[in-house]
């Protein structure tokens, strides 16, 4: 497929989740997102208020919850999501509890996402860490997210040693949720070709930390 630079930019969640990121780094990130025409920025919860102070209404503000391990209590994730929304976040990317996933405790996985849903009266994405899962686990996670009322499923945190997004995982996630939920690919997307391949596989949003590189080979 082929997209112009501005068309491709509208898929991008320009992301900075490094633990060492400063307020100045986030302000620079926001300026970059505006400059390239990105859809959203995604920053750590403690820096949401910094981004909210400088972002125009044309760029959405996202943050993470239960990040990066997902091994937090559901009640803690709910409190974290609610605090982020109060600080100005319009999107929450929550990490699923991978221990529950690996134990095949699907009712518990669904219940955890459902616990965060009312605390996040904005767009809710569920990060499933697809590279660490089997195909059956990916499908079951997507079904749990949909049953719990999530708006999106997302491949990866970008911090797990198993890796980030793959076109195979994105395609499987899209097949599972159909057009009912969005699919966000994140982790390791660094070129225009990779970005287009993810979109072609079914991604509706892309989490990227290097937007200039991702847009570099797209036609003007």
Image (cartoon, rainbow, N blue to C red):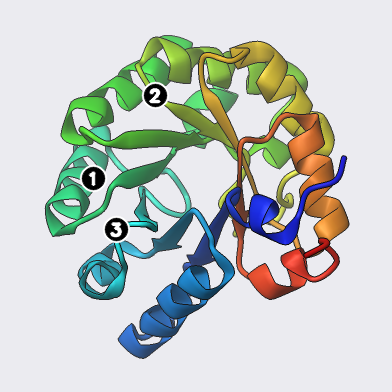
Question: Residue 143: x, y in percent?
Answer: 53, 12
Depth check, mark 1 against mark 3: the one in front is 3
Residue 187 tag number: none
Q: What crowding class fits label 1: few (fewer than 14 Cα within 10 Å), some (14-19), or many (20 or more)?
A: many
The residue tagged 3 is: 57
In the foreground, 7 or 182: 7
Image point (31%, 65%), residue name: 56
Compared with 86, 35 (above or below) is below
- Give the farthest residue toward the front: 220
Residue tagged 2: 150
Closer to the N terminus: mark 2 or mark 3?
Answer: 3
Please report whichever mark, 2 or 1, sits nearer to the chain's N-terminal start: 1
Picture quadrant where residue 174 is located: top right
Q: Quadrant of residue 114?
A: top left
Q: Residue at x 65, y 13 (%)?
A: 176
In the picture, measured across the screen, residue 129 lies left or right of residue 59, that is: right
Q: Which mark is residue 81?
A: 1
- Where 31 falls versus 91 (above or below)? below
Task: Name the quarter where the N terminus is drawn.
Answer: top right
Counting residues from the N terminus, which is met first, the one under dot 1 or under dot 3? 3
């Amino acid at each position: 497929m082929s997209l112009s630079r501005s068309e491709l930019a509208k898929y991008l969640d320009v992301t900075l989740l490094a633990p060492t990121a400063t307020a100045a780094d986030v302000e620079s990130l926001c300026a970059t997102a505006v400059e390239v025409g990105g859809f959203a920025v995604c920053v750590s919860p403690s820096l949401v208020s910094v981004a909210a102070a400088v972002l125009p209404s044309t760029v959405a503000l996202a943050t993470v919850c239960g990040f990066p391990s997902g091994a937090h209590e559901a009640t803690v994730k709910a409190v974290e999501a609610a605090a982020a929304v109060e600080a100005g976040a319009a999107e929450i990317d929550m990490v699923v509890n991978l221990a529950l996933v690996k134990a095949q405790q699907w009712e518990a996985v669904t219940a955890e996402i459902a616990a965060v849903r009312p605390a996040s009266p904005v767009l809710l994405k569920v990060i499933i860490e697809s590279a660490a899962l089997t195909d059956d686990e990916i499908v079951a996670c997507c079904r749990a997210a949909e049953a719990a009322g999530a708006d999106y499923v997302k491949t990866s945190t970008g911090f797990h040693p198993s890796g980030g997004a793959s076109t195979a995982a994105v395609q499987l996630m899209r097949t599972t949720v159909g057009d009912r939920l969005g699919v966000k690919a994140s982790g390791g997307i660094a070129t225009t070709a990779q970005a287009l391949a993810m979109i072609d596989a079914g991604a509706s949003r892309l989490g990227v930390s290097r937007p200039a590189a991702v847009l570099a080979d797209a036609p003007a």
